Image (spheres, rainbow, N blue to C red):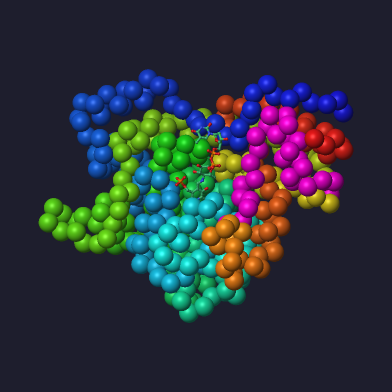
Amino acid sequence: MTAPIPFERPVFVTRPVLPPLGDYVALLETVWQSHALTNMGPMHQMLERAIGDRLGVGQVALWNNGTSALMGAIRALDLRGKVVVTPFTFPATVHAIALLGLEPIFADIDEESLTIDPAKITEVLVDEVSGIMGTHVYGRLCDTAGIFEVAQASGLKVVYDGAHSFSRNPPIFPDDPTVLGDITTLSFHATKLFHSVEGGATITSDPELDRRLRLLRNFGIASESDVELIGMNGKLSEVHAAMGIAMLGMIEGEIAQREGVASAYIAGLEGVDGIRIVAGNAQSMQYFVVRVDPDAFGSDRDSLFDTLRSMNVVARKYFSPLCSDMEPYSALPSAQNLPIARAVASQVLALPFYGGMSTDDATRITDIVKWHHDGNRR
Ligand code: T4K
């Protein structure tokens, strides 16, 4: 195989989708006329309703990012002591627990789903545990039925970090606590298929929890004369909500484009020993992730990563290092024995994946993977 030509400019793991500027400016004109800039104004209300309609659930509350939504969820449920969490996630999931003064306890993940394993949760349970937090990694759903069973048996609350999950088509969240947990959170960060530049949401099927979440995102203020609980500023501004509204019309087109890019990747990677596609081919169009089996592939993920970088392909190791190996958590007893998560984190690689990429770009990237596989190292 002849040596591939490096890309002229870096191809990043993602590139934010943008609506036509005119559409956004038209929405901003309404904001300028009303002088309503934040505090759950008309844009915020419109976006909240639209997202609820798309998800088919009634109780969606918008937040200013996915991390504050996670913290709001933990406070709304009044979690205390310790929370069992996956180590294979973005740091925000675990930081949300620790920032609120609770202790994370890591439980290993399932080899196939790459999400927290209900059987492993049971193994690490101690008296002080009040909740479970799983992440729908890359949009792949946790074993929600298994986790529901563990939670019911032990009287625990469940929060799902669904930061990657809004990009599913069709969306997956019925008004059902066995699927939603007590609360599911979403992120609408710029790097997500659907975004509001920064933004997030909570979803719950429990009206009282929804009420508490709304109080928590606005300083606990129930009325001018009544602050009901200790809350924070988790509000999404009108300027951000307007971006979300403009972006709503972009979702289907972006998904269709990504499906084309995914097909080119799948075709190009077919038959390459040791490469398994773990995201981008089914449950979510958020990331396209491969798993590199070093024995079958002939080299490890890091070596492939370096070759891709040398060709200007900026793939990312989502999620490596494991949260349990990060400085604030690495000394915890539960951080020591997570063999499946450790193996998975050393093998996953998120390839560039966004609608603005051409299918030719995807094919060129698979050619680099094959060239590397054939013994050509950086
Ligand atoms: N839970 C999970 C499971 C999450 O994945 C996340 C966030 C959260 C919770 C927290 O939600 P938020 O509080 O963020 O709403 C990015 C995102 O910043 C982060 O939101 C996301 N997950 C994570 C998976 O990815 P980085 O550090 O990898 O981002 P960065 O700046 O390296 O961006 C990646 C690439 O995207 C860049 O190489 C270029 C491109 N890019 C990025 C931005 C921000 C652009 O082209 N334009 C841009 O504006 O974390």
Count of labels shown?
0
Decide if residue 89 is on the left or right side of residue 37: right
Q: Nearer the viewer, residue 231 or 17?
A: 231
Res. 1 in view = yes
Q: Nearer the viewer, residue 229 or 109?
A: 229
Q: Nearer the viewer, residue 106 or 144?
A: 106
Where is residue 90? Give x, y as percent.
54, 51
Q: Is residue 143 magenta?
A: no
> Up-down: is 223 above or below 311?
below
Where is residue 94? Give x, y as percent.
50, 58
> Up-down: is 38 above or below 367?
below
Q: Residue furthest bottom?
A: 127
Res. 277 in view = no
* Residue drawn at (84%, 51%) of the image: 295
* Residue drawn at (36%, 25%) of the image: 24
Query: Can you say which quadrant of the picture contains the N terminus?
Result: top right
Q: Residue furthest left?
A: 225
Decide if residue 294 is on the left or right side of residue 257: right
Which picture quadrant has residue 315?
top right
* Residue drawn at (53%, 60%) of the image: 328
Which picture quadrant has residue 361?
top right
* Residue drawn at (60%, 75%) of the image: 123
Highlighted range, magenta: 296-323
Decide if residue 309 is on the left or right side of residue 236: right
Where is residue 252? Give x, y as percent.
50, 33
> Up-down: is 331 above or below 47?
below
Where is residue 190? Give x, y as percent.
47, 36
> Up-down: is 255 above or below 336?
above
Q: Is residue 318 magenta?
A: yes
Query: Can you say which quadrant of the picture contains the C terminus?
Result: top right
